[in-house]
């Protein structure tokens, strides 16, 4: 984050994660991919002239519709009192998954009457690739160009 402008550059955005393993990936239980990830969202006031505070709840929904234990991801308070926009950055030490397929991070905002409203869905596809597929996707090593011999 740039301290002067408060701008953020997002690099290495994950839309899909390939897991390379010889064993099948179980879809009947939650597992973790040991990759750190930051979930970034931007919120604005519903009325620019009216300061407000709200809470954000994040759920992770697997392809089979099962929801990750949201106790693992705490509620986040969004302070829109002093600024019209607020950015949230939730650091995840690992990416929970339940087999292969599209997993959705679903963001809910708490309204004033304690009701929750879905405000965003962020999909991440988890796919399985055999170790041989990973090797095939890598470019071949570059060979050094042999120097041409010239006749003197």
Image (spheres, rainbow, N blue to C red):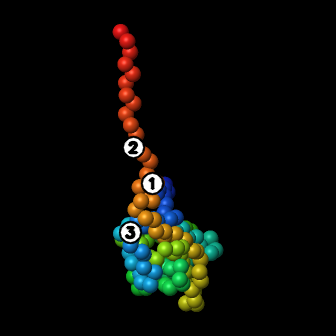
- Residue 141 has which mark? 2
Which residue shows up at 37% across the image and 12% down it?
Answer: 151
**Depicted 41 relative to depicted 67: above or below:** above
The quarter of the image holding the C terminus is top left
- Residue 136 has which mark? 1
- Under circle 3, the secondary element is loop
Place of residue 45 in the rendered image (x, y in percent of width and height, measured from the top left): 59, 73
| Viewer-nearest residue: 132 or 70 | 132
Q: Quadrant of residue 75?
A: bottom left
Q: Residues within 10 Å of mark 2 (few under 14, many from 20)?
A: few
The quarter of the image holding the N terminus is bottom left
Nearer-N-terminus badge (2/1): 1
Q: Residues within 10 Å of mark 3 (few under 14, many from 20)?
A: few
Quote the CA–CA distance across marks 3 and 2.
Answer: 25 Å
Nearer-N-terminus badge (3/2): 3
Which residue shows up at 43% across the image and 51% down it?
Answer: 138
Which residue shows up at 42% across the image and 83% down it?
Answer: 29
| Viewer-nearest residue: 117 or 27 | 27
| Viewer-nearest residue: 53 or 134 | 134
Place of residue 104 in the rendered image (x, y in percent of width and height, measured from the top left): 53, 75
Circles 3, 2 touching at the beta carbon (< 8 Å): no
- Residue 22 has which mark? 3
Which residue shows up at 52% across the image and 69% down it?
Answer: 125
- Under circle 2, the secondary element is loop
One can see residue 53 in this view: no
| Viewer-nearest residue: 103 or 59 | 103
């Amino acid at each position: 984050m740039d301290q002067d402008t408060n701008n953020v550059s997002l690099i290495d955005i994950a839309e899909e994660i390939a897991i390379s393993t010889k064993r099948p990936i179980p879809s009947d239980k939650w597992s973790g991919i040991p990759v750190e990830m930051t979930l970034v969202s931007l919120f604005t006031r519903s009325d620019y002239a009216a300061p407000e505070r709200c809470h954000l709840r994040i759920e992770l929904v697997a392809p089979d519709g099962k929801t990750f234990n949201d106790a693992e991801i705490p509620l986040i308070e969004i302070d829109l009192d002093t600024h019209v926009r607020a950015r949230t950055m939730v650091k995840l030490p690992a990416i929970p998954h339940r087999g292969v397929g599209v997993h959705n991070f679903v963001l809910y905002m708490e309204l004033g009457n304690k009701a929750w409203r879905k405000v965003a869905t962020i999909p991440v596809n988890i796919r399985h690739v055999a170790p041989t597929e990973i090797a095939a996707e890598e470019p071949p090593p570059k060979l050094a160009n042999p120097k041409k011999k010239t006749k003197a």
